[in-house]
Amino acid sequence: MPTKLFNEPSPLETRVVSKRFGLANSASLDTYLANDGFKAFLKAREMTPVQIVDELKASSLRGRGGAGFPTGLKWSFVPRTSPKPKYIVINADESEPGTCKDRLLMEYDPHQLIEGILIAGFALDAHKGYLYIRGEYRYLIDHMDRAIAEAYSKGYLGKNIAGTGFDFDLYTHSGAGAYECGEETALLDSLEGKRGIPRMKPPFPAVAGAWASPTLLNNVETFSAVPAIIRDGGAAFAALGTPKNGGTRLVCISGHVNKPGVYELPLGYPMLKAIDEVAGGIPGGKKLKAVVPGGSSCPILKAEECDIPMDYDSLAKVGSMLGSGGMVVMDETTDMVKVALRIMRFYAHESCGWCIPCREGTTWLRKILSRFDEGGGRKEDISLLGELSKNMLGRTFCALGDAAAMPTISIVDKFADDFEKRLSREMVAV
Amino acid sequence: MLQSYPEGRKRSAVVPMLIYAQDETGAITPELIEEVAKRCEVAPLQVDEVVGYYSMLHRQPLGKYHVQVCTNISCMLVGGTELYEHACKKLGIGHKEVTADGQFSLEEVECMGACSWAPAVEINYDFHHHVTPERLDQLIEGLRKSN
């Protein structure tokens, strides 16, 4: 890897899951063991499964993949006893535009992830885990395979882990290019060797997931936060954030900023401070125009809406989401028609085609937006864009339809001027 | 690879087996589909439909060096689109095309998870970050010379 992906530690950060980034050989098991590694697993072995789940609930950790579901609650949905084997599936299909954090967690601290998975395995009485990594991250698949091999060789995976009597096997599994496989049930279909198409819920994966067995699915960052929570206690983690929004998270800042990067910030961190101070502000002294707060599927925010703390509830109050932590900053020169079009080209390309509102809706929206971009926009197209998007909302099997509709509705609504300017001359004359 | 999955679940190996096999053979041929189907104990059609779904699986050979330029929003905001257009000119080919000598192919790709180090290019499986048109020229010339 030619580029070092993490930034120099900044005093503005609160480094919990990223605290080992930058240590010499941070990916090695020895470095991990010398820096609190596997202490949490050994502690968890002295706890009951219920106590572990309670600790997670106390941490108010919420899923870092995008939906923000409370992790402790998700773990508690997996039945305690099951005639079938249970599985742990780790979602490393990081594909949400604007998001590039799981790469760092795997590259610089793979054993933290492995420890989080082991704790989940112990808490849920599961003995096999599958790490589903997007195909484009081949170097990380190889890297995780090496880390897993090292963990096996030193007794931190396999039989009787660290002398505790607990057995666990972990395998990597390559995707092959499909955003849709980040959706948990589509990921499971992909893991089973099929096209990645979402399943009808219920049953939820906790009851019938991989190979129709009870399955826990969480994002890489979610599992990576587990060791610190168990080691230092759920309350300590929760205290870093705001009520109901525990801990820290990796925020991927990209777009028009002087210091784009992945920064670990406590939940509730002021968004403008993240842009102006952590990421060094906007180049050329330009003004802020818009922010995608958590990956391209989140409703976009106008500059005047950005004076808020970054936590799940505050973002929900302004009608958006914290999503996957992918924050895309846009300056005043940004053409929102181009942004809307590029986002829609993505969703039209990635729609799995399973349900009609998404398959047809994304393509239709893409065509209208292309027409705008080419200078042929019609006045009625502006309302049509909103109407079509609203008709997709909540009418699809999975969240991809919503993910395409939400940014479009917000862009058209909040930046109507950009669209007005691009109306065809003919239309303006009328 | 087949042993990673629970008993009777060999089908699970279809996607990884296809992508690793494609790396060896350069493209997914009908013979390869038959072979994967046999090893995973499924019908060839069940493998074929998977090939059609995933964007990294190809039925036609790519260039020896597959240049993937991201133009999704984070890259677009900092020159990804211009970089892709530059790559088209430099290589004289367009989206999903292969140069006459079979050395290079080009693809405009969706977000590859390099948003904070944009604009990004992946050549085969190697990531390149903060890529300028000049840097892309150097990378391409370097690969040409290495032949």
Image (cartoon, coloured by chain):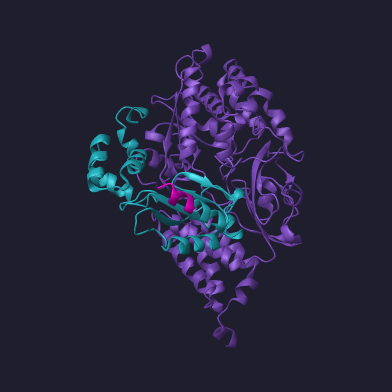
Q: Does residue B144 appear to the left or right of A332 in the view shown? A: left
Dividing the image into 4 quarters, which one contains the C terminus of chain A?
A: bottom right
Q: Colour of chain B?
A: cyan
Q: In front here: A361 or A57?
A: A361
**Splitting the image into 4 quarters, where does residue B12 fall?**
top left
What is the chief secondary structure element of the magenta stretch?
helix
- B142 part of magenta stretch: yes
In the rendered image, residue A263, in percent from the top left (x then y), is placed at 67, 42
Where residue A237 sits in the image (x, y, percent)?
A: 69, 31
Relative horizontal placement of residue A57, taking residue A169 as reference (left or right)? right
- The residue under the point 63% across, 31% down is A57
Q: Where on the picture, by quarter, is residue A351?
A: bottom left
**Residue A183 shows in this picture:** no
In the rendered image, the residue lying farthest to the bottom is A430
Q: Residue at x 40, y 35 (%)?
A: A210
Q: Which residues are magenta?
A: B140-147
